[in-house]
Image (cartoon, rainbow, N blue to C red):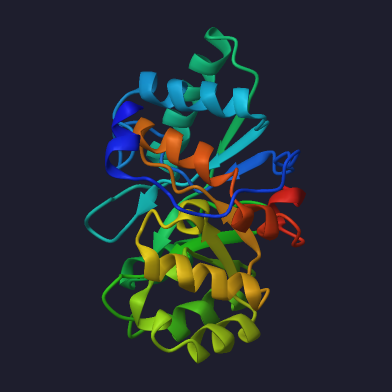
Amino acid sequence: MGIFSSFFKPKVKPAEPGFINPVHVEFHSHLIPGIDDGVETIEQSIEILRVWSEMGYKKVITTPHIMGDFYKNGPENILPKLELVRAALKANKIDITIDAAAEYMIDDMLEQKVNEKKILTFGSNHILVELSFNEEPRNFKEVLFKLRVEGYKPVLAHPERYPFYGQQKDKYEELFDSGILFQINIFSLIGYYGPQVQKTAEWLIEKKMVNMIGSDTHGTRHLPVLQAAVRSKNYQKICEFKLLNYEL
């Protein structure tokens, strides 16, 4: 954890004295070992979950990547490995529960999975989706429409991180008004992805366009980032919203 202080020193307003994190469900992480760019071993998963339990989290909904031909994941490999993590939690007597959904890239493969009804959801048929960081997918609106027709409720992962929206903020309003939910990365609140991403996250908070928060943890290197972020004023502000986290 000492590496954290050497490469990233957040300069943000601290939360008010006495602030206690009211969020007990950690959403958006990559804790199923060896299937995406997240943790590589169950030991790493358990280390993260142990710290989160100590931080007061009671439940985790982890979200492995599902992405075209790159991360060919699905219920058939995510759910069995989820059971291995659950067994390790029990063996280590860590008081936290873990479920799994997925983080779906908006691509042609997602349309196929919707047709096959092979979708991992959370909450009330919610589905977490992400975009390429380069540009909005050509089939974005079509996929969103199809998801809604099939009864899914799309949640857009880390909208503050897409530079093509940050430069045209009216697109955020258009998407939000259309009914898609926004999940902000907690790390964005303290500038982990850069000052511009932090400014966009703060703009979304100001506009009250936040429905969920999640860490997007990929490994143990992110533990001190989360610990710092939940002590920030930006995080305190976001916790005042009616977050979906409170209902999960």
Quadrant of residue 210 within the rendered picture: bottom right
Task: Choose between 132 and 233: the one closer to the eye.
Answer: 233
Across and down, in percent, residue 42 comes to 38, 22
Query: Can residue 179 be spotted in the picture?
Result: yes
User: In terms of depth relative to the viewer, which is nearer, 212 or 240?
Assistant: 240
* Left or right of 17 in this view: 219: left
User: Residue 242: percent from the left, percent from the top?
Assistant: 77, 61
Q: Nearer the viewer, residue 123 or 182?
A: 182
Is 116 above or below relative to 78? Answer: below
Residue at horizontal 67%, vertical 29%?
Answer: 56
Residue 224 horizontal/vertical position (percent): 44, 34
In this picture, residue 19 sits left or right of residue 5:
right
Task: Choose top left, top right, bottom left or bottom right for residue 131.
Answer: bottom left
Which residue sits at x=37%, y=18%? 43
Screen quadrant of the N terminus:
top left
Task: Give coordinates of residue 25: x percent, y percent.
Answer: 66, 41
> Looking at the image, which is closer to me, 7 or 43?
7
Residue visible at 76% across and 58% down in the picture? 240
Q: Let me know if residue 124 appears in the view.
A: no
Query: Which residue is pictured at 40% across the width and 34% down the height?
Result: 32
